[in-house]
Amino acid sequence: MFLWFGVTSIVGTALIFRSPFLDYRLVAIGALLPVLETTLGFKWLLHTLIFSVGVLILVMLLGKGKRRLQRKFLPVPIGLLAHLVLDTTWTEKEIFWWPFTGSENFGNEVSRLEFSFSTGLILEFLAIIIAVWGWKKFEMKNSVNLSAFKRHGHLYSLRVN
């Protein structure tokens, strides 16, 4: 479900934060990182809230006094958190709240709530529709906007005029 996590994390984050200078490519990378675990057949550390919050704290601490560094890497934990929402991991307390809920079920095979193949296809199709809508919404037909996204991950159409 590459498109579901990548596209919806970009569009959702852009609509919520409305920041033209956030690197939305890094949001997508953050949202796609936990997919690596899922493709291996389990949900583990990358699907926990503590991991996403830990990455957020790490970005803020390593970038203390370096605002540009914080702003550059802040999209990664935003994407990780977006994945938890889009994957419905928040409904699986043993994984989402680990280590506070114990570790007996931690790292087991993908849970009962994992999307079925047909659900995955529907979500990928929905992501294509969202991508087309986002392409229009963020005026990606404009070469300046497209170039800014390719080079810096920026969505200039979010600028307040």
Image (cartoon, rainbow, N blue to C red):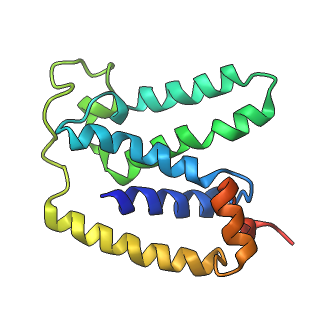
- Measuring 57% from the left and 76% from the top, which residue is drawn there? 135
Q: Quadrant of residue 115?
A: bottom left
Q: Quadrant of residue 58?
A: top right
Left or right for 42, reference 86 = left
Observer-nearest of 125 and 140: 140
- Measuring 32% from the left and 24% from the top, which residue is drawn there? 98
Left or right for 18, reference 130 = right
Q: Which quarter of the rendered picture does the N terminus lie within?
A: bottom left
Left or right for 17, reference 111 = right
Where is residue 71 shown, x and y percent of the image?
Answer: 72, 39
- Measuring 51% from the left and 29% from the top, which residue is drawn there? 53
Observer-nearest of 26 and 114: 26
Q: Which quarter of the rendered picture does the C terminus lie within?
A: bottom right
Q: Quadrant of residue 17?
A: bottom right
Where is residue 46 shown, x and y percent of the image?
Answer: 36, 33
Q: Is residue 90 visible?
A: no
- Measuring 43% from the left and 27% from the top, which residue is drawn there? 51
Observer-nearest of 137 and 86: 137
Where is residue 50 shown, x and y percent of the image?
Answer: 43, 26
Query: Is residue 91 placed above or below 15 in the rendered structure?
Result: above
